[in-house]
């Protein structure tokens, strides 16, 4: 048994080793791009093996690093070796972590036995994954669909969800994980400010089809994410957690940090100029306000007055300001949207999906991640074209997974929201407040996907399931707040 001080020093040393190993991995990728293949293969293989060893010895810290690097390094920051998926720092570290986790499951049966007995939603998730494999069998692009199911659904979401629900049982893990998320979030916000200040994002070199996007005279920042809307969705997921820690009793420096971080997130969200994430962020803030005033009639009356005055201000701004009118007219008057706009494109996607699923494909769809290979042809803006980007996730899953897969997916969402409702009803104190944050983040992400398709985008889908994992482990998080730090399993 190692004492707490020695354990902390050991974890710190191993954490530093992990960072050094990641730098080596990133350097290996750079050398590969310079066509130093033999040198890279040697260094890359050795580095990968060391990362596997690190994650095997300290799986909890490995999980924290996976989340941290996933936020800061998009999957697109990578090299492509056809027909394999893109390989970069995030996928490399996550691959090493997954291998280490599998080895621990094989050699430490306790993890597998305990987690299997307590894994939330295990039956429904299993049915959903099976439906994905059936859709893969009949897919119009079987190899693409297979990679999507194994990589995107099983590894990047459900396997990490499985591990998170297990690690969250360990006292102290949730605090370390939040620290990693908040540190990465601070970097994301600061990088977004720099991007806005210099008018460009150097990471666009990894996105050959992307370009600086300006809307309403503002450069739409994307920071370390592949698109401004993705950054807006990330803020929707994280902001409720920041509010929870901001309102929790703590020291003055800690509270000032969360005030600063919440302010940075609000400014960054504004700079994305992404309307649906804006609306969802407003609703998340409104949920917290309503929750605090719900038992006080005087405060409820004041809140209703503020909401009415705010709605009047929005109506005036919409009618008197051309910029506000242009931004929100697609929501106010969707039938008068111009054909070349992104909002009209979403209507086109819905109509095209509805037309294509009127066939035997209605049952199991065209296959996971097959939308851009199914040659969905439509005519709008006086041009006949093939749709490659399904901008509504729920239309996408109907097309790709059919009635069976989409029904199971919606059941997963419904059970998650029901779990949030039960937690709010049954728990008290800080656990109830954390349940409110998780439920608000989950509901916001569900809503925003009516206009985009972000469940399949790493790390957003993984972070969604992270909130779900916390929601299912809330009583344990409440116990952690009142118990001393203990040895991690």
Image (cartoon, grey):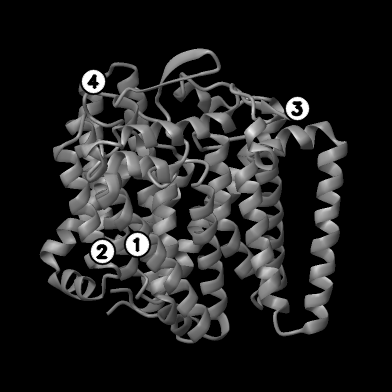
The answer to whether residue 317 of the structure is visible from this angle is yes
| Whether residue 4 is situated above or below residue 140 in the rendered picture | below
In the picture provided, is 78 more to the left or to the right than 215?
left
> What mark, if any, has residue 213 been given in the picture?
none
Q: Nearer the viewer, residue 434 or 351?
A: 351
Q: CA distance from mark 1 to mark 3?
A: 41 Å
Q: Nearer the viewer, residue 341 or 485?
A: 341
Q: Residue at x 19, y 38 (%)?
A: 146
Q: Which of pointers 4 and 1 lies earlier in the amino acid sequence?
A: 4
Picture quarter with the N terminus: bottom left
Q: Is residue 317 left or right of residue 450?
A: right
What residue is disc 1 on? 411
Q: Secondary structure at mark 3?
A: loop
Q: Position of residue 453 (x, y in %)?
A: 44, 41
| Residue position for label 4 | 37
Q: Earlier in the sequence, mark 2 or mark 4?
A: 4
Query: For mark 2, what is the residue?
Result: 124
Asked if labels 2 and 1 touch by Cβ distance under 8 angstroms, the answer is: yes
Q: Earlier in the sequence, mark 1 or mark 2?
A: 2
Residue drawn where x is 34% and y is 20% of the image: 33
Q: Kindly report the distance in space between the C-alpha atoms of the residues bearing marks 2 and 3.
A: 46 Å
Distance, label 2 to label 4, CA atoms, is: 44 Å
Residue 169 lies, in percent from the top left, at: 35, 75
Residue 100 in the image: state x and y as whole percent: 21, 54
The residue beneath circle 3 is 217
Q: Position of residue 102 (x, y in %)?
A: 17, 57
Q: Is residue 164 left or right of residue 187?
A: left
């Amino acid at each position: 048994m190692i004492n707490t001080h020695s354990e902390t020093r050991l974890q710190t040393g191993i954490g530093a080793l992990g960072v050094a190993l990641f730098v080596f991995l990133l350097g290996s990728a750079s050398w590969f791009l310079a066509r130093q293949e033999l040198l890279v293969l040697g260094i890359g293989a050795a580095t990968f093996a060391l990362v596997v060893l690190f994650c095997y010895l300290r799986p909890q810290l490995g999980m924290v690093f996976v989340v941290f690097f996933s936020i800061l390094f998009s999957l697109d920051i990578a090299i492509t070796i056809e027909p394999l998926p893109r390989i970069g720092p995030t996928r490399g570290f996550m691959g090493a972590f997954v291998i280490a986790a599998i080895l621990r499951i094989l050699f430490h049966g306790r993890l597998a036995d305990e987690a299997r007995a307590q894994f939330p939603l295990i039956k429904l998730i299993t049915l959903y994954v099976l439906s994905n494999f059936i859709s893969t069998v009949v897919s119009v692009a079987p190899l693409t669909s297979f990679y999507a199911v194994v990589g995107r659904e099983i590894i990047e979401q459900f396997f990490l969800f499985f591990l998170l629900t297990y690690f969250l049982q360990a006292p102290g893990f949730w605090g370390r994980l939040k620290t990693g998320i908040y540190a990465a979030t601070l970097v994301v916000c600061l990088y977004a400010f720099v991007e806005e200040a210099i008018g460009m994002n150097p990471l666009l070199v990894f996105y050959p089809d992307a370009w600086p996007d300006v809307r309403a005279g503002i450069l739409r920042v994307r920071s370390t994410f592949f698109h401004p809307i993705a950054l807006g969705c990330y803020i929707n997921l994280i902001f409720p957690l920041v509010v929870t820690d901001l309102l929790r009793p703590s020291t003055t420096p800690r509270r000032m940090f969360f005030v600063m971080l919440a302010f940075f997130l609000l400014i960054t969200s504004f700079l994305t100029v992404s309307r649906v994430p804006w609306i969802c962020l407003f609703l998340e803030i409104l949920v917290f306000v309503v929750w605090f005033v719900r038992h006080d009639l005087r405060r409820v009356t004041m809140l209703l007055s503020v909401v009415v005055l705010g709605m009047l201000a929005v109506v005036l701004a919409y009618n008197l300001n051309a910029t506000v009118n242009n931004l929100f007219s697609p929501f106010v008057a969707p039938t008068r949207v111009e054909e070349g706009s992104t909002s009209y494109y979403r209507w086109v996607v819905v109509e095209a999906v509805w037309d294509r699923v009127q066939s035997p494909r209605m049952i199991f769809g065209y296959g996971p991640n097959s939308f851009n290979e199914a040659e969905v042809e439509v005519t709008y803006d006086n041009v006949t074209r093939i749709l490659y980007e399904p901008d509504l996730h729920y239309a996408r899953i109907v097309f790709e997974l059919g009635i069976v897969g989409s029904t199971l997916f919606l059941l997963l969402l419904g059970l998650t929201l029901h779990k949030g409702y039960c937690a709010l009803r049954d728990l008290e104190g800080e656990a109830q407040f954390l349940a409110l944050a998780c439920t608000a983040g989950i509901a916001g992400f569900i809503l925003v996907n009516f206009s985009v398709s972000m469940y399949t985008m790493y790390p957003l889908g993984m972070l969604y399931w992270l909130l779900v994992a916390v929601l299912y482990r809330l009583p344990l998080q409440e116990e952690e707040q009142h118990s001393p730090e203990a040895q991690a399993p």
